[in-house]
């Protein structure tokens, strides 16, 4: 039997677990009072990675070709980049 | 019997294309808000850091877990309807709604705490951003829950099938957008300093 599975549930389950883990690490970074540029950029990187995972796997954009593959990634890149620049400028 | 997984490419995202135009508009608004927060913070770093440390990061952690999990449940709901499993779709949507309700309850408690402390939009620049950003997102969570509830009711009545389930995908896409925004909002407002 050939079954079309557009979204791999197993992949999405792993993505969910990875996102929960990254969230916990982000929280712990805050709880331990880790501030400064490197901690901020690490946390921002985790957030952008999680956002890309939501777009690729949960929204299903990984299998899209053409224009609609990119808006979510672009959205993460532009505001994420601006936030990164603003935090870098103040050190 | 062997099940093969075939991942096909499409030109358009799941759901109604109109919701994607709406999603892009919403993301642009939140993106502008995030940029404004970060650049305003540059002139008031100490003040932003001080008031940020007074926020309830435990509540934010619970809320982030709730939204990520609700998004995963919505993925399962879409997978169920693609398998022609209406009841499964309804159950996963209800589970996602429970997670959404947890978010609203926890966030409401945070707001109640701020109100009791006399904190308003005009208290200072940090709270102006914090309250506007999170409340704007809060309203989107409510909107997303209304959409998911409407989809669940229609699914319960057998309104979708493996062949026709654009409504489920449309509601799911909106809900994932709500999750996506929170994933950036959480570290930006509660953690990064």
Image (spheres, coloured by chain):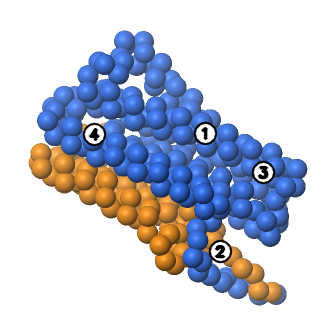
Q: Is residue B65 left or right of residue B117?
A: right
Q: Is residue B17 left or right of residue A48?
A: right
Chain under disc 4: B
What residue do we see at 74% from left, 44% from top? B150
Q: Quadrant of residue B146?
A: top right
Label 1 and label 2: CA atoms lie apart by 27 Å
The hue in which chain B appears in the rendered picture of the protein = blue
Circle 3 SS class: helix
Q: Position of residue A4 (x, y in %)?
A: 72, 79
Marks 1 and 2 close (CB-CB < 8 Å)? no
What residue do we see at 34% from left, 46% from top? B32
Label 4 and label 1: CA atoms lie apart by 24 Å
Circle 4 SS class: helix
Label 3 and label 2: CA atoms lie apart by 20 Å
List the residue tagged with mark 4.
Answer: B37
What residue do we see at 26% from left, 57% from top? A81
Q: Are marks 1 and 3 on the same chain?
A: yes
Q: Quadrant of residue A72?
A: bottom left
Chain under disc 1: B
List the residue tagged with mark 1.
Answer: B143
Residue B108's place in the image compared with B27, above or below, is above
Circle 2 SS class: loop
Chain under disc 2: A
List the residue tagged with mark 3.
Answer: B90
Q: Position of residue B39 (x, y in %)?
A: 21, 43
Q: Are marks 1 and 2 on the same chain?
A: no
Label 3 and label 4: CA atoms lie apart by 39 Å
Q: Is residue A41 left or right of residue B145?
A: left
List the residue tagged with mark 2.
Answer: A6
Residue B126's place in the image compared with B152, above or below, is above
């Amino acid at each position: 039997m050939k079954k079309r599975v557009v979204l791999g549930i197993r992949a999405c389950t792993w993505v969910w677990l990875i996102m929960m883990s990254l969230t916990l690490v982000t929280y712990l970074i805050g709880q331990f009072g880790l501030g400064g540029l490197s901690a901020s950029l690490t946390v921002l990187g985790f957030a952008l990675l999680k956002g890309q995972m939501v777009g690729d796997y949960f929204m299903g954009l990984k299998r899209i070709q053409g224009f609609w593959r990119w808006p979510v990634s672009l959205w993460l890149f532009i505001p994420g980049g601006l936030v990164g620049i603003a935090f870098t400028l103040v050190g | 019997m062997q099940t093969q997984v075939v991942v096909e490419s499409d030109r358009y995202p799941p759901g109604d294309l109109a919701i994607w135009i709406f999603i892009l508009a919403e993301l642009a608004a939140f993106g502008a808000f995030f940029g404004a927060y970060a650049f305003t913070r540059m002139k008031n770093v100490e003040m932003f850091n001080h008031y940020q440390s007074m926020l309830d990061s435990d509540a934010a952690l619970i809320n982030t877990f709730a939204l990520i999990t609700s998004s995963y449940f919505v993925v399962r709901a879409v997978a169920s309807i693609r398998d022609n499993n209406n009841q499964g779709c309804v159950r996963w949507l209800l589970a996602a709604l429970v997670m959404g309700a947890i978010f609203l309850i926890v966030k409401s408690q945070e707001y109640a705490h701020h109100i009791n402390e006399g904190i308003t939009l005009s208290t200072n620049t940090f709270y102006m951003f914090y309250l506007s950003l999170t409340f704007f997102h809060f309203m989107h969570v409510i909107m997303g829950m209304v959409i998911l509830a409407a989809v669940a009711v229609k699914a319960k009545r057998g309104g979708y099938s493996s062949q026709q389930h654009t409504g489920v995908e449309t509601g799911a896409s909106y809900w994932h957008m709500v999750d996506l925004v929170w994933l950036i909002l959480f570290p930006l407002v509660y953690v990064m300093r």
